[in-house]
Image: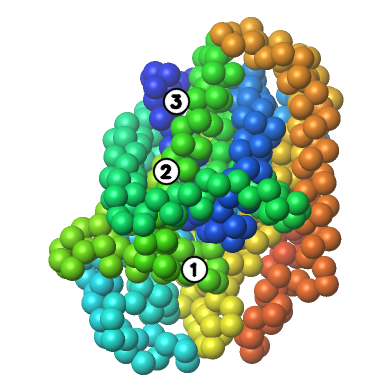
Amino acid sequence: MSAPRQNWQSKLGFILAASGSAIGLGNIVFFSSNAYQYGGGAFYLPYFIALFLLGMPMMMVEFGMGTITHQSLPLALRRLAGKRGEYLGWWAIASALFITMYYVAILGWALGMMLGALGSLFEPGIAAPFTPIQEPTAAPNATVYFFNMISTWNPLIYIVVIWLANLFILRQGTKTIEAAVRIFVPLMWAFMIILVIRGITLEGGMDGVLYLFTPDLGGISQPGVWKGAFSQMFFSLSLGLGTMTAYASYLPKDADQVNNSMLVSFLNCSFEYLAGVAIFSLLFVFALNPAGTTLSLSFFVIPQGINELSSLPWVVRLFGFGFYLLVVLAGLTSSISLIEAPASALIDKFRISRGRALAIIAIPSVIGSCLFALPRIIDPGLSGDGTLGLTLLDITDHWVFNYSLLAVGLFEAIIAGWVFGADKLRAALNQHAKVKLGKWFEYLVKYVIPLVLLLVIVFSLIAEWPELYGSSYDMPGYGWLASFIPVFWIFFTLIFAYVLTRRQTREI
Ligand code: PFF
């Protein structure tokens, strides 16, 4: 006999947990590098449109599915659309596992940098075993420090520590999650506000803010910008992986999900813009020019800016430590939700204990996370990512981040809009909502969202042509990774979803 379904102890607890899930590496690490890559103001407008067109309505769909069915994603979709729905749910969960593995690996590196801030991150004279950076540096250099770190086995320890922290927070479900987010979420807001104040009070800091917020109408004619904005919006709002449905399934039936979606999206996007302000002000003041992978901004450029903040070493260390602590806290409140999605799905389907579900997920996933930190150098000239782990991470992220979330969103919208019925969904959401959704919501879910997502996915796939992502990296003996990773991801997730859907659901 299993325990009754758990509940959030308060509405605040749910809002903190859901916004904690949304606010994470995506807001600090990925948003600013995407915004930079696509040209500041050129990104900001499509991103804003994505919020209203896709983000908020899809959050209503995912929250709605959770409270209507009181089930996590696979079984919620099964209620709405039968076995095919469940299959989609497990496919989303499989992708969530991939993302969790590398998300935790990045958090492990952030923990390494946090410790480094107290150690030798801000000291000169480091070298890394890569051809371009073998010479010891005359000044502190975060890029060199980072590559030095990831080419050792140390990050494996950090990754295990982050995994243990996740499992500790998840051990009693909503009760322990709520206790953690009550401390972590306010703390990360406080750190971010301090960082913003420091950034904009630097001379020239406002130029970066202007760059970010001045709309660039020329840039928005490029389809790549829209694709970037839409994928970033899905990732940032934690959509398409089952987390929001799992969290919402612990709410009472009369929860106002229209209001909750607006509140969580608003909190997430405010944090994101604050992070943009903090980071872009540093970039402009110190004329820093990020290049390379998504991680470069937070792992190479920001510490470089922090290093120049003050001539007092303890101030630099304190800010460096504070920045990475912020990244770790924000990331932890997201990674717990990433793990809760499969955990609650297993508990719902097989009626197993939470401890058992967490063990089933953690054992293979810890190994997976460690693979993303393998220190073997396969690209000494740094034409791509340098180590085996970072290369695996970069290529996996490219495929999963850009395609799986949007594909799940596309099918969720079709199921909610056409199979379950957009009118029924709207009526269910409106039943307890203070602000009622108009007929426009039905058009969005039935036509606009599926069409937009389909277009973005098709355009992105066409843009992959003719060269597979990663195949230009100079990695002797490892060139096959560029095609192996996407093929493995597709097959693994499809088979995983098939096997889990076929298994018998244990009724209570
Ligand atoms: N929203 C998180 C972030 O911005 O870092 C990441 C994330 C968590 C994505 C949970 C998806 C998810 F289901």
Confirm or deny contact between disc 2 and disc 3 (CB under 8 A): no
Confirm or deny contact between disc 1 and disc 3 (CB under 8 A): no
- For disc 3, the marked residue is 14
Mark 2 vs mark 1: which is more N-terminal?
Answer: 2
Q: Label 3: state its secondary structure.
A: helix
Q: Position of residue 18 (x, y in %)?
A: 48, 32
Q: Residue at x 59, y 83 (%)?
A: 383
Mark-to-mark CA distance, 1 and 3: 37 Å
Q: Is residue 12 left or right of residue 433?
A: left
Q: In the image, what residue type sits under mark 3?
A: Phe
Mark-to-mark CA distance, 2 and 3: 23 Å
Q: Which residue is at the front of the view, 64 or 456?
A: 456
- For disc 2, the marked residue is 274
Up-down relation of residue 81 to residue 180 (above or below): above
Q: Residue at x 64, y 89 (%)?
A: 476
What crowding class fits label 2: few (fewer than 14 Cα within 10 Å), some (14-19), or many (20 or more)? many
Q: In the image, what residue type sits under mark 2?
A: Leu
